Image: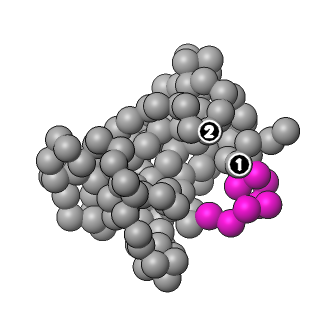
Amino acid sequence: MATIFTRIVNGEIPCHKVAETDRYLAFLDIRPQAKGHTLCIPKRETDYIFDLDDDDLADLMVFAKRVARAIRQVVPCKRIGIAVIGLEVPHAHVHLIPLHTVADLSFKEPISIPAEELAELAAQIAACAG
């Protein structure tokens, strides 16, 4: 059965898309740790990030770098943190999280952001991601 991320890639489930290539997709997390929390995924379903071949892993990180720079242009923060956990969805993904302190990357209770604000934020980041 396809993962929720594959279903997003296939257009079966909507997302707040911020960047896309033929191989990768970035969208706002619906259970964000901070405003601008974004997930970067390969479109091809692979459970574990370190099962990606070297070129795909490297290209995913370059894609995430582009997205992180766009987030930082839109969301005031000190840094964009990066986390790869991989337990919550069996589809390789990278979390990009705007940070003000080290504790901001603790995966505490998610914050609540209205859907309209998520849509606007996604559009702003997408405009910067090129």
Picture coordinates of residue 126, whole percent (x, y): 47, 65
* Amino acid carrying mark 1 in the image: Ile
Classed neighbour count for the residue bearing mark 1: other residues with Cα under 10 Å, few (<14), some (14–19), many (≥20): some
Colour scheme of the picture: one colour
Which contiguous range is marked in magenta? 7-15
**Label annotation for residue 80:** none
Image quadrant in which you'd find residue 129? bottom left
Q: Earlier in the sequence, mark 1 or mark 2?
A: 1
Q: Which residue is mark 1?
A: 4
Q: Residue at x 28, y 43 (%)?
A: 105
Image quadrant occupied by the N terminus: top right
Q: Which residue is mark 2?
A: 89
Task: Residue 22: tell me if it is visible.
Answer: no
Task: Residue 94: tell me if it is visible.
Answer: yes
Total numbered badges shown on the rendered structure: 2
Of the pair 126 and 16, the residue shown nearer to us: 16
- Dot 1 falls on a residue whose secondary structure is helix
Q: Describe residue 73's horizontal placement relative to residue 32 as left or right.
A: left
Picture coordinates of residue 28, whole percent (x, y): 49, 60
* Amino acid carrying mark 2 in the image: Val
Q: Describe residue 13's horizontal placement relative to residue 79 as left or right.
A: right
Q: Residue at x 20, y 44 (%)?
A: 103
Using the image, determine if residue 126 lies above or below residue 93. below
